[in-house]
Image: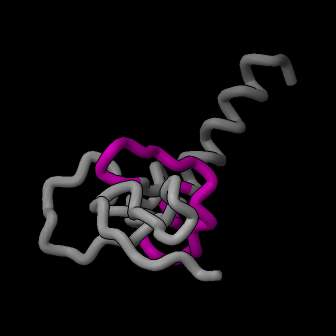
Amino acid sequence: MNAQEMYEQAMHELAAKISLIRSGDLVCDHPIKQGDNYGTSCSICGERLAGYGYNARDFSLPCLHEWWPTGDGLHEVCTFCESVRQADT
């Protein structure tokens, strides 16, 4: 088998796996993620992983917060919706 045939076989197997994931027959482990200032989503199955999801258009869903510390050490802020909470101490 030459390199071109190996590449085509690998791409065929990948397409089959993606099809099974999207149909719900195979659980996605979210190997490829895409993110922006709205959130992060899985590029394979489309599941929203953080914030409002990648390239969000629907903000009626609750934010899946991703907390980061503020400079004061007492609070944390969500990267996506900018909600603030007290830091766990």
Q: How many marks?
A: 0
Residue lying at the far front of the rendered structure: 72
User: Relative to the observer, which residue lies in front, 15 or 1?
Assistant: 15
Residue closest to the far right: 1
Coordinates of residue 59 in the picture (x, y in percent): 15, 65
Q: In the rendered image, which quarter contains the N terminus?
A: top right
The residue under the point 61% across, 41% down is: 12
Query: Looking at the image, which is closer to me, 27 or 55?
Result: 55
Residue drawn at x 64%, y 82% as measured from the top left: 89
Q: Is residue 37 left or right of residue 69?
A: left
Q: Is residue 77 above or below residue 61?
A: above
Query: Which residue is painted at 46% across and 44% down in the image?
Result: 34
The stretch drawn in magenta includes residue 47: no
Q: How is the image coloured?
A: one colour
The span shown in magenta is 18-39
Magenta span has 23? yes
Spot occupied by residue 83 in the image (x, y as percentages of width and height)? 30, 68
Residue at x-position 51% and y-position 66%: 21
Q: Is residue 4 above or below residue 40?
A: above
Name the spot of residue 67 as percent of width and height, x first: 49, 65
